[in-house]
Amino acid sequence: IASQEAEKRGWHLYLVGGAVRDLILSEAENGTLMINDIDLVVDGFHRAADVGAGVELAKALQEIYKNARLEIHGAFQTAALLWHKDSELDSLWVDIATSRTEFYPYPAANPEVEASSIRQDLYRRDFTINAMALRLTVPRSGELLDFFGGFLDLQAKQIRVLHANSFIEDPTRIYRGVRFAVRFGFTFEEETAESISYAINSGVYERTTQENIRTPALQTRLKTELKYILEAPYWQSALQLLDELDALQCIHYSLKLNKDILRKLRLLDICLRRFDKQQSLNHWQMRLELLIAHLAPQYRAKVAKNLQLADDSIMRLKKLADRQNEVITSLPNCDLSSQVVHFLKKYDLQTLILIALQSQREVRNKIWVYLTRLANVQPLLNGNDLKQLGYKPSPIFKQILDDLLKATLDGTIKDKDEAREFLA
Ligand code: ATP
């Protein structure tokens, strides 16, 4: 339907980027293909007014598919149609862009002009495997446009960058490359690997993080890539590859992985599985917080802020060192369970997990016992029981329930009868 709408207007429509790559890969592997994210590019104009073609096409499609939501991003003349379902896997996102080239005042029928326009659009992309297009409109619909050897690179299972200085311009491309390498089991082609180490050794990332001169748009892209990586099943291999490439310094120049961090990240996974039922935890964000928690305290909040993490994350990392000191100093003196509960209940779950992972066994065990057992203990009698015992609702209720909880936690009372005796 989209191609018919484009054809009606005399335009060309292409499927570009990741969907073309995934289509070819799934064909080669005889696999099934799930695409939730489709990138289309409209091209082949002959009127200046057509520079907004992507938006016009999206509007026309929304007239047909009324259940789709339309979003227009004016500055880049792009539009998106969303079919949103509860699960992300069932949702569909179609981005429609207008080929980002200068307007050509030639007739669209001139194939050279069309080709150079879509070629230029593809040339702005990151890797050859992501820079192919499939023509959806007649004539020659179904034709693969592969100007940079993406098809051969897919067959050779290699990630090849389009421009030598690509990683200097945009460090998130290293993260993207790593993500594709790990996800598909590909390797970096030799010159691409050299370009990565050249960019890293040039000190550009170190300088830009230290001098805080990155654009917010770049930081957003870095955060998005980190999110993709840290929520993927292959997060551990991806982090290790980023570390081997020395690319974690894009987050902070002093960030390096070691056995200790990897062990803590694995322990964190156990915590995430254990506490997910109690409180929904943001897994990728917790992994990132743990990585950032390994930086010296003075850098943590700044790095979190630069990465545009949520406010609660930034605050947690800002206060982590002080809170950790408090816990390490005071928790060993809490001998009774009620003292442990009284002391730890002011901290949020995420903070306690981060502190536990960074602490020695005694503190870690106490936090674990608190989180898994003590935090859920309830007083043996509730407000209704107290009313039945003849107590009138009053502010003293809370005091009584607190005392009951304390006695329950410390094992002074073991059942309701003992609780009633305790009150008497
Ligand atoms: P995925 O399947 O993981 O979503 P994708 O390739 O579709 O992978 P997107 O982030 O949706 O990834 O990007 C769509 C396309 O935009 C890419 O295929 C690539 O051509 C281009 N692109 C994305 N990010 C960059 C970048 N930082 N630099 C250059 N081109 C990029």
Image (cartoon, helix red, strand yellow):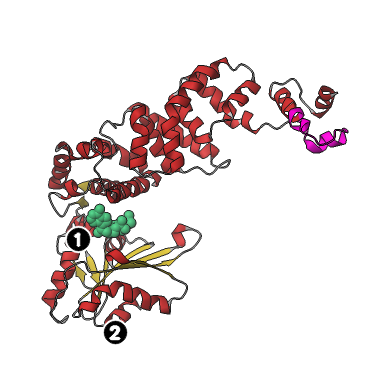
Q: How many marks?
A: 2
Q: Is residue 383 magenta?
A: yes
- The residue lying at 38 percent from left, 47 percent from top is 232
Q: Does the residue labelled 2 lie within 8 Å of ligand 1?
A: no
Q: In this view, does 340 lie to the left or right of 408?
A: left
Q: Given the current orientation, which residue lies at the most extreme front position?
A: 395
Mark identifier at residue 151: 1
Q: Is residue 55 left or right of residue 362?
A: left
Residue 277 to residue 6: above or below: above
Amino acid tagged 2:
Lys
Q: Is residue 208 magenta?
A: no
CB contact under 8 Å: marks 2 and 1: no
Residue 370 to residue 33: above or below: above
Q: Give the range drawn in magenta.
A: 380-400
Measure the alpha-carbon separation of dots 2 and 1. 31 Å
Mark identifier at residue 403: none
Quarter holding ligand 1: bottom left
- The residue lying at 37 percent from left, 45 percent from top is 308
Q: Residue 39 at x, y = what percent?
A: 31, 65
Mark identifier at residue 8: 2
For the residue pair 65 and 154, the one nearer the viewer reads as 65
Q: Residue 275 at x, y = what percent?
A: 54, 38
Q: Quadrant of the N terminus?
A: bottom left
